[in-house]
Image: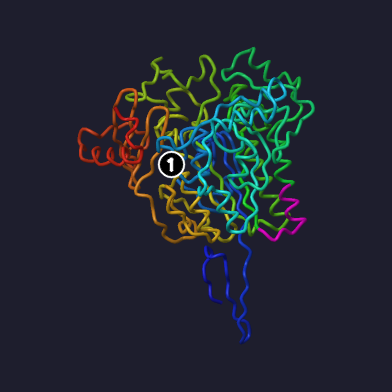
């Protein structure tokens, strides 16, 4: 038997008793599960001790996980970067639409008026621009997206279709995703009403724990159906239907879940946490959101296995950005203040660390910073690839890879040419025990300013407000506590030039 290549359309040439026959193995299905605000420290495989995540951990134990994977600093640019294969430091790369507009649907605005308003703001795709789902479609895949749909804070079915999705179900408005009891969702451009859910803001609650906030969360009036349950029902039904119809095409599925993005809301506290004296009620509910995400990953795997699809399905698990603290409570946890000194973080000499702000979960995995920052805790994310019997088992890769590398990685896996005009490059060979080309450096943006990390671990971060560059060497300084620019001025100059080149220097004074 001559093994040609897993990455070249999975063609196997077999010699059988004197004659040769060519058997073309079906290309693998691909499912990308994209968590929302899930710091990697919330997963057992990255060290979490309070919340058990056996289903996600199993993917890591039987697949490959990455220690140095980078997302973006918050949700809208992360999704744009993922779906375009471009990094978020480029000036004017995307227009970010305003969220909340769909709360006006049938309450002062028609669907058409809302779509027209979004299309006036949203930057139209260039005629020859290729998006992630289109890469899969070109390779013969059918494509589907479930959950928190697309980038910006509001989208339309026309934009989803342009980006290559054959089927889509979920929210068109990211602000509405801050509640978990939507009165309606969308399926392929059709409004789907959800009887029993009556809150126009989807039942959004408060971000800081209080007696009033607790009562509000657990007042279930007008909260009949939880969005994750609705979306999972559609997602699992899609897999069922695929199996029944024996679709000739493989499928590429994107599942950008709401979980565990806040404000905190959950139908019930998971039994693992009900009597855990280490946790406040708020923390128990938040832990239950993470637990639900893990359970749903297990449900997807079990469904694939029951339909005999698992062995020919790649499952990827990732998150959009670093950790965010949603369990803030007076005299307990405050993400902006060092509780040991009662001083606000300045993000130059002081920064969020779990022990200083009492994040009981250590969701940023001991790194500095949170979502929206250019510390490692703001942009380093979990990344796991699993393909039963095909991808390396139990490997932890040190390679630095980026959210914007996924598009070209998928292209190589499904047998398409890499798109050279994209910022990302493929790391597919790494998944199969070979040596991939590597990015010389990763760039990310943030509310503070941009940052650059080289493949060997030198990091330059910029504080826009203070006009300050800071240099760190991550292999020796996991928490970014030792600033090294004074003794490494040439290194600062070199990395600064690269960062300015990637960004056009538009942010630098």
The C terminus appears in which quarter of the rendering? top left
Question: For the view shown, which residue lies furthest in the top direction?
Answer: 212
Start-end of magenta stretch: 238-249
Which residue is pictured at 35% across the width and 45% down the height?
441
Residue 250 lies in what quarter of the image? Answer: bottom right
Residue 294 lies in what quarter of the image? Answer: top right
Q: Residue 393: x percent and y percent?
A: 53, 56
Residue 276 lies in what quarter of the image? Answer: top right
Q: Is residue 268 visible?
A: no
Q: Residue 451: x percent and y percent?
A: 36, 36
**Circle 1 — which element?**
loop
Residue density around tag 1, few if under 14, some if 14–19, many if 20 or more, within 10 Å: many
Q: Residue 82: x percent and y percent?
A: 51, 43
Q: Residue 119: x percent and y percent?
A: 58, 33
Which residue is pictured at 54% across the width and 40% down the height?
44
Q: Specify the principal SS of the magenta part.
A: helix
**Residue on which disc 1 sits:** 87
463 left or right of 280? left
221 left or right of 333? right
Which residue is pictured at 76% across the width and 31% down the height?
193
349 left or right of 158? left
Query: Where is 85 relative to 485, above or below?
Result: below
Q: Look at the image and say whether residue 157 sits in the magenta stretch.
A: no
475 left or right of 259? left
Question: For the view shown, which residue lies furthest in the right direction?
Answer: 195
Q: Is residue 52 visible?
A: yes
Counting the numbered discs, the total is: 1
Color theme of the render? rainbow
Q: As rendered, which of 362 and 325 lies closer to the eye?
A: 325
Q: As rendered, which of 42 and 386 lies closer to the eye?
A: 386
The N terminus appears in which quarter of the rendering? bottom right
């Amino acid at each position: 038997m001559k093994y040609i290549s897993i990455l070249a359309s999975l063609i196997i040439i077999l010699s059988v008793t004197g004659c040769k026959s060519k058997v073309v193995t079906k290309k693998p299905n691909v499912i990308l599960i994209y968590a929302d605000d899930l710091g990697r420290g919330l997963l057992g495989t990255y060290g979490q001790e309070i919340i058990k995540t056996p289903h996600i951990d199993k993917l890591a134990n039987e697949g490959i996980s990455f220690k140095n994977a980078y997302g973006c600093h918050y949700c809208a640019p992360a999704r744009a970067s993922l779906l375009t294969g471009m990094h978020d430091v480029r000036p004017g790369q995307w227009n970010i639409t305003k969220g909340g507009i769909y709360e006006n649907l049938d309450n002062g605005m028609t669907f058409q008026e809302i779509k027209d308003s979004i299309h006036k703001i949203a930057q139209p795709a260039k005629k020859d621009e290729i998006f992630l789902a289109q890469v899969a479609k070109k390779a013969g895949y059918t494509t589907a997206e479930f959950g928190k749909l697309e980038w910006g804070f509001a989208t339309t079915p026309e934009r989803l279709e342009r980006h290559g999705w054959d089927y889509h179900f979920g929210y068109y408005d990211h602000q509405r995703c801050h509640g978990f009891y939507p009165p309606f969702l969308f399926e392929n451009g059709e409004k789907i009403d959800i009887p029993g859910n009556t809150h126009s803001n989807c039942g959004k609650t408060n971000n800081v724990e209080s007696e009033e906030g607790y009562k509000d969360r657990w007042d279930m009036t007008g909260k009949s159906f939880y969005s994750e349950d609705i979306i999972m029902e559609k997602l699992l039904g899609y897999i069922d239907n695929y199996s029944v119809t024996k679709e000739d095409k493989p499928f590429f599925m994107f599942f950008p879940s709401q979980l565990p993005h806040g404000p905190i809301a959950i139908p019930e506290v998971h039994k693992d946490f009900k009597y855990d004296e280490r946790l406040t009620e708020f923390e128990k509910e938040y832990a239950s959101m993470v637990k639900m995400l893990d359970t749903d990953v297990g449900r997807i795997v079990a469904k694939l296995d029951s339909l005999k699809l698992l062995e020919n399905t790649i499952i990827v698990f990732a998150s959009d950005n670093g950790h965010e603290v949603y369990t803030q409570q007076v005299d307990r946890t405050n993400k902006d203040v060092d509780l040991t000194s009662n001083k606000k973080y300045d993000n130059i000499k002081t920064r969020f660390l779990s022990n200083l702000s009492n994040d009981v979960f250590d969701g940023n995995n001991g790194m500095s910073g949170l979502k929206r920052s250019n510390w490692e805790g703001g942009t380093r994310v979990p990344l796991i690839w699993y393909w039963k019997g095909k991808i390396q088992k139990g490997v932890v890769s040190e390679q630095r890879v980026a959210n914007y590398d996924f598009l070209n990685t998928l292209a190589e896996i499904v047998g398409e040419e890499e798109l050279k005009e994209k910022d990302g490059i493929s790391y597919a060979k790494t998944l199969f025990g070979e040596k991939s080309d590597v990015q010389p450096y990763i760039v990310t943006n943030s509310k503070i300013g941009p940052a650059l990390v080289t493949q060997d671990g030198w990091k330059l971060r910029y504080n826009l407000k203070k006009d300050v560059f800071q240099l760190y060497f991550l292999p020796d300084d996991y928490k970014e506590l030792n600033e090294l620019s004074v003794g490494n001025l040439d290194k600062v100059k070199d990395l600064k030039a690269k960062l300015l080149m990637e960004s056009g220097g538009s942010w630098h004074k």
